[in-house]
Amino acid sequence: MIEARDLHKAFGVVKAAEGVSFIARDGEITGLLGPNGAGKTTTLRMLYTLMRPDRGAVLIDGRNVADEAETVRRALGVLPDARGLYKRLTARENIEYFAQLHGLDAATTRARCDALIAALEMQDIAARRTEGFSQGQRVKTAIARALVHDPRNVILDEPTNGLDVMATRTMRGFLKQLRNEGRCVLFSSHIMQEVAALCDRIVVIAHGRVVAEGTPDELRANTGELNLEDAFVKIIGSEEGLHA
Ligand SMILES: Nc1ncnc2c1ncn2[C@@H]1O[C@H](COP(=O)(O)OP(=O)(O)OP(=O)(O)O)[C@@H](O)[C@H]1O
């Protein structure tokens, strides 16, 4: 479980997060939806311990990040906005390297790598150096690497950004599999259709604040709109972020 509790973060005069609070539960996919510059990446960075909030708290499985950063990090798998692969290593070696950093033994490393490579349909690229990888190939490698230690909570910053239709389908199927395994899956997107297709719960963020939250049905009911797109226009107050 991931909990954002009244998170604030400012960069000079820019207030990127102004009291962001929400809970992402186990066995659910939670989507953080908002237009460009809404504060999604900043919020996720605070949640995955990269950035310290000016105010507020982050709790992962009930543990406060400020007190137990190391324990919390072991329970987190993160796809950051900068994917950052080692380009001289193959895709498999990138994943194995993270397994070593987490202290996994050789047999577990092999088993986890094989399972992730199969689940993400990356058998054809596993033995290739990542230098020159396409966007989709890089994202798959970075996700496999983020999940090699079998974390209970998964945070992904715009995981389908730049992916083609087939790669997006694979990614959606993979995220659902993580959810069905009982994990807590939280991802950000500025694309309404992406969030609508995948999420059990949606947290809508605009100008650093949570402006709506609920299941797709609840968001429709609360806005009095039959169509989710119309509901978002009403919530965000513009058509930003509605189109892929
Ligand atoms: N390191 C930083 N220094 C200065 N300003 C920043 C920094 N990081 C974020 N900001 C500002 O904070 C605001 C929120 O940015 P953030 O990246 O969190 O938005 P986002 O919702 O992820 O947007 P996008 O969909 O475009 O990625 C923006 O105005 C951005 O310019």
Image (cartoon, rainbow, N blue to C red):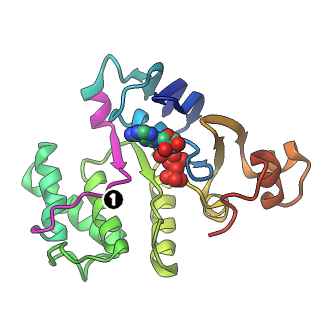
- The reply to whether residue 10 is visible in this rendering is yes
Q: Position of residue 187 (x, y in %)?
A: 50, 50
Asked whether 79 falls inside the magenta stretch, the response is yes
How would you rate the neighbour count of disc 1 (Cα within 10 Å): few for under 14, some for 14-19, many for 20 or more?
A: many
For the point 24% across and 28% down, the residue is 70
Q: Residue furthest right?
A: 224
Magenta stretch bounds: 71-88
For the point 43% across and 34% down, the residue is 47
**Which residue is disc 1 drawn over?**
143
Question: 91 left or right of 191?
Answer: left
Q: Is residue 15 above or below residue 192?
A: above
Q: Position of residue 208 (x, y in %)?
A: 59, 36
Front one among 221 and 26: 221
For the point 64% across and 42% down, the residue is 205
Secondary element type, mark 1: helix
Asked whether 76 falls inside the magenta stretch, the response is yes
Q: Amino acid at mark 1?
A: Ile
